[in-house]
């Protein structure tokens, strides 16, 4: 494992795909918006509020996918001590927190008109709120140490402990009675969403993934620059 | 057209949802972009001033 | 440090992480099982019948609104309906505003307490299922007779 050779190679590769990812994000979100708002039908039960699904469900998927990224990066950092893995984990948590906030806020805006409440403490909603606190805890913990190596290790341990929450979020709606309905897309026996609604959902989700990738690369670049500046300042004689 | 914006009477829930989702993502990208640009500009500035963080690290034997 | 020693240390760290995760998962499963009563958001009418409730104890009950059971009155904003889980049916009385999605055959969660044989609800929330389709598709399904009639007991559901 070459300590700094790999970040450089990674960044060269990442910068090459960055414009393409940006273009994909604009295209997919543009087409997704058009399909979600203009080209998709209202629901037979939920009427026009079903359109909230196209911004809510991808945010919830990304909230969990980003946590998986964070956990894998954290495991890689603990096992191989690779600094790039530490940077990726630190870059992922604020992005994951942002998607979790979107999922919670749009969920409240959907819950109020349909369920009759902004919030309930059922297993699904509560476990997603725990996910937000895991992200915030990770951000706080990684920055709580003067030595970035120690901060990275503490954050990685927290991220791995929090992995237990992922299956709880996913299966909460099957294991316990919840107000939140069971899964519609990733379930046994296939999706229960009409194709006219499933297509805009997937296009929008593709756009969200592209936004995540762009933000992740940019944040890794920012953290890498930060670390180089830090190392420079430490090596200056008057520091 | 006004029917479209009314969202079947649920405008107060649908539009804020889209506003939050796209607002947060836009904010995320702007923050990520400016933080990367500012950090890299600072590194560049110091390098132009003759101080190369990477060369120093190489000197410390960290590289390779 | 020899290459072999480095590899074995990595393997040890990997094993430590996997072991830790397995341990944590088991602990979480035990805790969640032990506190299942507080993790579930509501009980079914059958659960409620099996359980000894203190008079006036607040609890949530959920199920499907039985088709044809909704009746308004006699009081202002008063509504009576039956909630079923397919096995047990529970009459509910509620005074207040119902959520938009409240309708016969749809899921519902009521919070309140049992008074006599009737559940006095303070709050009624709607619970929708996982199917999404345009109204035309729902109509077509009904015409072709592929529709599961509303309010039909769904075994083991919700």
Image (cartoon, coloured by chain):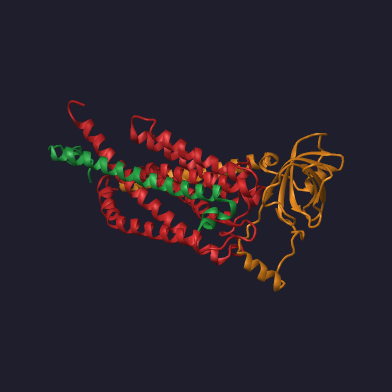
Chain colours: A red, B green, C orange
Taking A25 as reference, is B38 above or below it?
above
x, y percent for residue C138: 65, 66
From this viewpoint, is residue C9 visible?
A: no
For residue A101, side relative to residue C158 (left or right): left
Figure quadrant of the N terminus of chain C: top left
Image quarter of residue A29: bottom left
Q: Give the residue drawn at x 34%, y 48%.
A: C4
Question: Which residue is the extreme one toward the left?
Answer: B50
Residue A158: x percent and y percent?
Answer: 47, 38
Left or right of C138, for residue C23: left
- Is residue C117 shown left or right of residue A211? right
Q: Quadrant of residue A233?
A: top left
Q: How many marks?
A: 0
Q: Residue at x 74, y 51 (%)?
A: C63
Quadrant for residue C23, please give it: top right
- Residue C140 visible in rendering: yes
Position of residue A218 measured from the top left corner of the image (x, y, whole percent): 32, 47
> Residue at the front extreme?
B2
Residue extending farthest to the top is A238
Of residues C143 and B10, the one drawn nearer to the viewer in this rendering: B10
Q: Is residue A203 above or below residue B57?
A: below
Q: Position of residue A36 (x, y in %)?
A: 50, 59
C44 with respect to A20 (left or right): right
In the image as oriented, which residue stretches furthest toward the right? Answer: C116
Which residue is found at the position 45% from the left and 61% from the top?
A34
């Amino acid at each position: 494992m070459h300590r700094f050779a790999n970040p450089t190679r990674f960044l060269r590769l990442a910068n090459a795909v960055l414009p393409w990812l940006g273009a994909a994000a604009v295209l997919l979100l543009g087409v997704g918006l058009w399909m979600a708002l203009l080209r998709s039908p209202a629901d037979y039960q939920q009427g026009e509020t079903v359109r909230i699904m196209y911004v809510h469900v991808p945010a919830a998927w990304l909230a969990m996918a980003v946590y998986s990224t964070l956990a894998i990066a954290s495991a890689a950092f603990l096992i191989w001590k690779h600094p790039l893995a530490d940077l990726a984990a630190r870059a992922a948590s604020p992005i994951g927190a942002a998607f979790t906030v979107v999922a919670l806020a749009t969920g409240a805006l959907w819950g109020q008109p349909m369920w009759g409440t902004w919030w309930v403490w059922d297993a699904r909603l509560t476990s997603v709120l725990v996910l937000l606190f895991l992200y915030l805890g990770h951000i706080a913990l990684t920055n709580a140490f003067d030595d970035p190596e120690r901060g990275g290790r503490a954050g990685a341990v927290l991220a791995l402990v929090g992995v237990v929450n992922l299956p709880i979020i996913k299966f909460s709606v099957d294991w316990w009675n919840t107000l939140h309905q069971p899964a519609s897309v990733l379930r046994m026996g296939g999706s229960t969403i009409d194709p006219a609604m499933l297509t805009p959902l997937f296009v929008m989700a593709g756009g969200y993934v592209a936004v995540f990738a762009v933000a992740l690369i940019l944040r890794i670049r920012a953290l890498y620059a930060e670390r180089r500046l830090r190392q420079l300042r430490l090596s200056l004689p008057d520091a | 057209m006004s029917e479209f914006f009314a969202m079947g009477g649920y405008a107060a829930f649908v539009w804020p949802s889209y506003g939050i989702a796209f607002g947060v993502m836009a904010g995320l990208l702007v923050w990520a972009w400016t933080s990367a640009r500012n950090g890299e500009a600072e590194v560049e500035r110091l390098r132009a001033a003759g101080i190369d963080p990477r060369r120093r690290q190489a000197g410390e034997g960290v590289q390779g | 440090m020899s290459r072999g020693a480095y590899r074995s240390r990595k393997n040890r760290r990997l094993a430590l992480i996997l072991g830790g995760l397995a341990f944590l998962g088991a602990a979480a499963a035990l805790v969640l099982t032990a506190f299942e009563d507080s993790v579930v958001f509501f009980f079914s009418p059958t659960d409620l019948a099996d359980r000894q409730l203190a008079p006036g104890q607040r609890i949530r009950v959920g199920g499907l609104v039985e088709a044809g059971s909704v009746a308004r009155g006699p009081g202002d904003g008063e509504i009576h309906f039956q909630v079923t889980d397919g096995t047990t049916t529970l009459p509910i009385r509620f005074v207040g505003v119902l959520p938009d999605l409240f309708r016969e055959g749809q899921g519902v969660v009521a919070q309140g307490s049992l008074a006599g044989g009737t559940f006095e609800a303070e709050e009624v929330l709607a619970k929708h299922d996982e199917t999404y389709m345009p109204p035309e598709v729902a109509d077509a399904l009904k015409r072709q007779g592929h529709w599961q009639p509303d309010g039909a007991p769904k075994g083991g559901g919700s």
